[in-house]
Image (cartoon, rainbow, N blue to C red):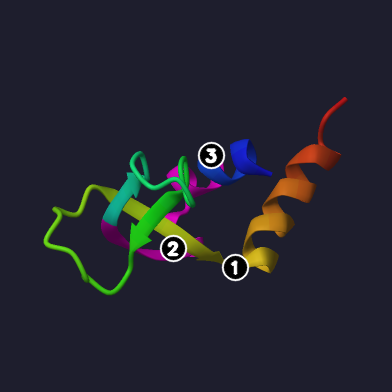
Amino acid sequence: MHDPCVIAYLITPDLFAGKTVNVSIETTSLLTLGMTVADWRRITDRPRNVHFLREADADGFYAPLTERLARLP
């Protein structure tokens, strides 16, 4: 549910947890070509360029979503 999560993050960012890391797309390796790589441990010196969210409060997300969907005509 990518689109509803974006809206939920904009309304209530406290429901989500993550950190700012460097994310790049592998373009030179034959084995991992096209792979998205997130540098969680700061192994490279590349600048942090993405706020990567990897955890969410599922109950906190679904409760308002289902409540709002129930109000639809």
Specify the label residue 57 is tagged with. Answer: 1
Specify the label residue 14 is tagged with. Answer: 2
In the image, residue 62 lies at what x, y percent?
72, 56
Q: Who is closer to the viewer here, 53 or 46?
A: 46
Q: Is residue 4 left or right of residue 49?
A: right
Which residue: 11% across, 61% down?
A: 45
CA gap, disc 1 to disc 2?
9 Å
| Above or below: residue 30 compared with residue 53 | above
SS label for mark 1 = loop
SS label for mark 2 = helix
Amino acid type indicated by mark 2 = Asp
CA gap, disc 1 to disc 3?
14 Å
CA gap, disc 3 to disc 2?
13 Å
Q: Is residue 26 left or right of residue 59?
A: left
Q: Who is closer to the viewer here, 31 or 36?
A: 31
**Considering only order in the chain, which callout, 2 or 3, is on the residue closer to the N terminus?**
3
Amino acid type indicated by mark 3 = Ile
Q: Is residue 8 magenta?
A: yes
Q: For the magenta stretch, what is the residue range?
A: 7-21
SS label for mark 3 = helix
| Above or below: residue 72 compared with residue 13 | above
Give the labeled residue for mark 3.
7
Which residue of the protein is positioned furthest toward the top in this rendering? 73
Which residue of the protein is positioned furthest toward the front in this rendering? 30
Specify the label residue 30 is tagged with. Answer: none
The reply to whether discs 1 and 3 touch (Cβ–Cβ < 8 Å) is: no
**Considering only order in the chain, which callout, 3 or 1, is on the residue closer to the N terminus?**
3
Binning the other alpha carbons within 10 Å of mark 3 as few (below 14), some (14 to 19) or many (20 upward) gives few
